[in-house]
Image (cartoon, grey):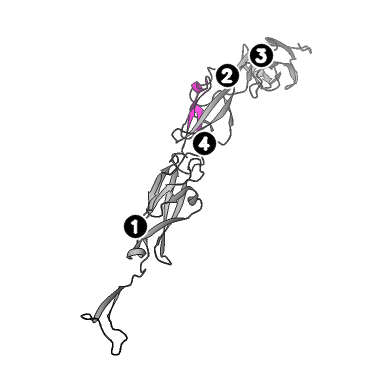
Amino acid sequence: MFLQGTVSLRDGGNPPLTPTGVETATITVYVTKNDHTPYFINEPYSKDLEGTIQLGASVFHVTARDDDRLLFGSVRYKIIGDDLAPTYFQIDENSGMIVTKNALSGVNQNQFKVRVEAFDGGSPSKTNVSVVTLTVKSNNQRPIFNQQSYFAHIPETQSLGQRIIAVTANDSDALTPFSDITYSLVGDGTATVYFQFDSSTGVVSLRQSLQPDTASTYNLRILASDGGCPPRTDTATVIISVQRNLNAPAFDRRIYYGTVLEQDRIGRPFTKVTATDSDRQAPYNRIIYRITESETSAINYFYLHPETGHISLNQCTNGTDNRFIGCVAAAAKGMVVQVSGAAVGCNSSGGSDFL
């Protein structure tokens, strides 16, 4: 915008005198106004940064323009937020280049909103604001298991591939791959022979049958690793106790004798068999008794209590053989049954004595 006018020259005489040959002159006045506001180009702004970026390194370049002329068309920049962004970043006032102000390694924040203000040369200046989103890819946190020791109890007949226990770790990094966790089995001893591990789910299962082995406890060490390079890790222990039926019951004698009257009362015990089991763990040290076979019809005439070992008449023996020989077995309860046997001889007599 401009203003234009004409002026004439003369002195203060009476009559006034004017310059010879020059009576008038034209004056043009240009008026500059701050009509426009700065505006950013190529928005939106965002960039991923490595957490190891050096101090003072260039991060991002913003550009704003102003359609005014001269001073009002010049643009400068400053950071006005947000939160911790001014602590870790600064901007060149004239070029708009954002650089690191403090080291980003170890900062427990993965994203910064750098709010940049562009202002022109007016007084007061006109301004505009844009936000630069800077995402810091930094592996600040390590995986942490929910517990350092896990315990499981399984029978020696555990099915192959059946889930035994699952371990879980968490990583508080917000970004992948630093928050991604994989698991691996790192020991100990023969544990890796018998057990397997799912690296993605953390599930422990049986690789091969435990029955050929005799160990009662297996220790597994599990490693949790995140996706960093190098990865950060944590370790937990899985202790698996195996319930084994190692020992067979043992009778306190190999042959038992007893005598019953021909008319003896049905159900009254006339002798008892006794066995013990040296296994320490229930149910493998709990014994049950049963009649397995006989040389005569003893299995039909006598009842063996499965828990106490008492033998009694099951029916009257009148008119039958007067001598019965049977075999009894004591079995330790459990998925794998250990059995021991003994013989029982019984005389059917008119007497009243018991042997």
Which residue type does callout 3 highlight? Ala
Q: Residue 108's x, y, as percent?
A: 52, 44
- The numbered mark, 3 or 4, whose residue comes first in the sequence reads 4
Which mark lies nearer to you, 3 or 2?
2
Q: Residue 112's x, y, as percent?
A: 46, 50
Q: CA distance from mark 3 to mark 4?
A: 52 Å
In the rendered view of the protein, which quadrant contains the N terminus?
bottom left
On screen, residue 144 above or below 216: below
Q: Which mark is residue 41?
A: 1
| Residue range highlighted in magenta | 180-207
Which residue type does callout 2 highlight? Ala
Q: Residue at x 69, y 23 (%)?
A: 307
Q: Which residue carries the number 2 mark?
A: 215
**Residue 216 sits in which quadrant?**
top right
Q: CA distance from mark 3 to mark 2?
A: 23 Å
Give left or right: position of 220 versus 268.
left
Which mark lies nearer to you, 4 or 2?
4
Q: CA distance from mark 3 to mark 1?
A: 92 Å
Which residue type does callout 4 highlight? Pro
- The numbered mark, 4 or 1, whose residue comes first in the sequence reads 1
Which mark lies nearer to you, 1 or 2?
1
Q: Which residue carries the number 4 mark?
A: 143
**Residue 329 sits in which quadrant?**
top right
Q: Which residue carries the number 3 mark?
A: 250
Which residue type does callout 1 highlight? Ile
Q: Is residue 187 magenta?
A: yes
Q: Within 10 angstroms of label 2, few (less than 14), some, or many (20 or more) residues?
A: some
